[in-house]
Image (tube, rainbow, N blue to C red):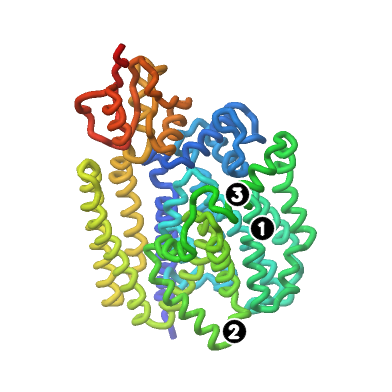
Amino acid sequence: MLDSTALSDESQMRRKGNVTALFAAIVTTFVCLFGNLGAIGLVGPDEPRYAWIARAMAETGDWVTPRLYGQPWFEKPILYYWTAAVGFRMHLSPEWAARLPSALAALAAAIAVGWLARKHYGGGNGLVRSSAFLAPLVFSTTVAAIAFARAATPDMLFSASIALAMACAATVLRRAGVFRPLEPPAHRARPPLALIFFGAWLGAAVLAKGPAAILLAGGAIVLWALATKNWRAAFRLLHPRAIAGFCVVALPWYVLCALRNPQFFHVFIIQHNFERYLTPIFLHRRPFWFFGPIVLLALLPWTALLWPAAQEGARLWREKSWSGSPGFFFACWAVFPLLFFSFSQSKLPGYILPAIPPLALLLAVALERAARTGAARAGLIFSAVGITWIGIGLTAVIRAYRTPVGMREDLGGAILALSVLGATGGILIVALALFRRRSLLLVSFFLVVIVVLFAGARLLPSLDPYVSARPHAALLQRDLRPDRIFTYHLRRSWNYGLAFYMRRELPEWSPQDPEPALVLTSPAGLDELRKLGRFQGALEETYRGILFVPVRPAPR
């Protein structure tokens, strides 16, 4: 007879272990998605533009027409601007107001993949055996999630809305009895809420980035139906409840904006959707295979898990059971955005972000099954993860030595420390895998947390002046002649950033201007100023992104 006291103690220890694991998972998720959102100022041409529009919306109260520098701007729809404007209304710092919507959206995507894993693969007992536990963690610790959770852009809102819509679609299909294990007959009634929310979340995705949401979600579902011949189940998603949910969410703003702005349809639908896809008008032309390496980088440090995921797919193919597998539906969801945007004449890394949640889910399922089939196979997989970390560390060392001398002084130490951290962590993971220690999964996630915290505390603040206008604008706030500050031969990202932080556009300096001025420029611009005879000698400052050049009066 078993000792009931021993069983009770074992159950209590398991509960404590689960609580500890849950707490660690929450900390990991929040550090990766929300940690140090303001460690670096707004960067690139997009972040300061979108943040300007959101701030202007919050200040003017015009919640219909996006405006950049007072003029209508229809590059993207309204959802990001609405959500960021709420942050500005709450008087959050500019970086937190602009980036918090993306962080919250990433959290929603993580919850969606965890919920899908729970519904389709079960909860399991313990950390390694639960894909429902692993899927949100794998997603939250990928390079793609960490980076785009900190991007003041609509990309993560778009991807999360599609993830939530596809989770609802999977619910409808599961209750139609097309996935194994089959849903009990009592649960196969038509799910009105799932249909409504499918349409509503798809409408939110259309509000985030436009009609591409319909193409990506619809294309993935059509690809799945085409392969499995389950057209009847797929057509359930066109139920009037789904269409009503979509129309209620998406149509009001589109109709109202078009009525107020006659140019909206041509600028947004024609130029920024059809022409962007069909022509290289926006100069983002890349080769057809561009997104292959991007996906491999986006899934770091878990890229090695693609191999067991592929093996799982091959097993289902050999057993001829793939058509009833929910994993095949998730694979269609992941593959279709890659195929669709590979044919686009404009390609940017963020375009394939909608593929990352389903890929993370498939990687988590493969990891769970690999661990369940045997310690040796799990050790081999985690050895590959450890080797990936070692490769990241070595790459960081090479990168540190290739940075310009000035940047190396500011960033070299932090990059080298990160490289040592990554390589050491990778060696530890490989060692734990070889000795088959169960703690290696915890170490893997913990290593991501440490890298994110260190980068936010040391690397990004040092990088700030090289990529963001925030520190430069802070210096200019004390200038005694703000009317005589100009830009000259700066990249557009600097112009947008300076405009956001100084709350006004800075004019471009003209060589015909005879008066003295402070000119913000690049090394190439400095050479031009010297050739024009408007500046001689050397600057006292070290070049950090922008040069502050005092221009002399023109000779009379």
At 23% from the left edge and 30% from the top edge, which residue is drawn?
A: 541
Q: Is residue 265 left or right of residue 85?
A: right
Q: Are marks 2 and 1 in contact (CB under 8 Å)?
A: no
- Of all residues, the one furthest to the right in this rendering is 240
Indicate which disc residue 214 carries.
1
Q: Which amino acid does label 1 sit on?
A: Ile
Quarter residue 218 falls in: bottom right
- Label 2 sits on residue: 321
Identity of the amino acid at label 3?
A: Lys
Between the C-alphas of marks 2 and 3, the distance is: 36 Å
Residue at image point 60% right, 49% down: 209
The amino acid type found where label 2 is placed reads Ser
Q: Could you say which is closer to the camera, residue 315 or residue 129?
A: 315
Q: Which quarter of the rendering shows the N terminus?
A: bottom left
Q: How far apart are marks 2 and 1 (CA)?
A: 29 Å
Give residue 374's position: percent from left, percent from top: 39, 82
Which quadrant of the structure image shows residue 537?
Answer: top left
Q: Which of marks 2 and 1 is nearer the N terminus?
A: 1
Tell me where residue 256 appears, x and y as whole percent. 73, 38
- Above-or-below relation of 108 to 166: above
Q: Name the residue under label 3.
A: 209
Q: Earlier in the sequence, mark 2 or mark 3?
A: 3
Question: What secondary structure is found at the residue carrying circle 3?
Answer: helix
Work out how far the residue at label 3 is from the one at label 1, CA to CA, in angstroms: 10 Å
In the rendering, at what x and y percent does residue 318 appear?
53, 88
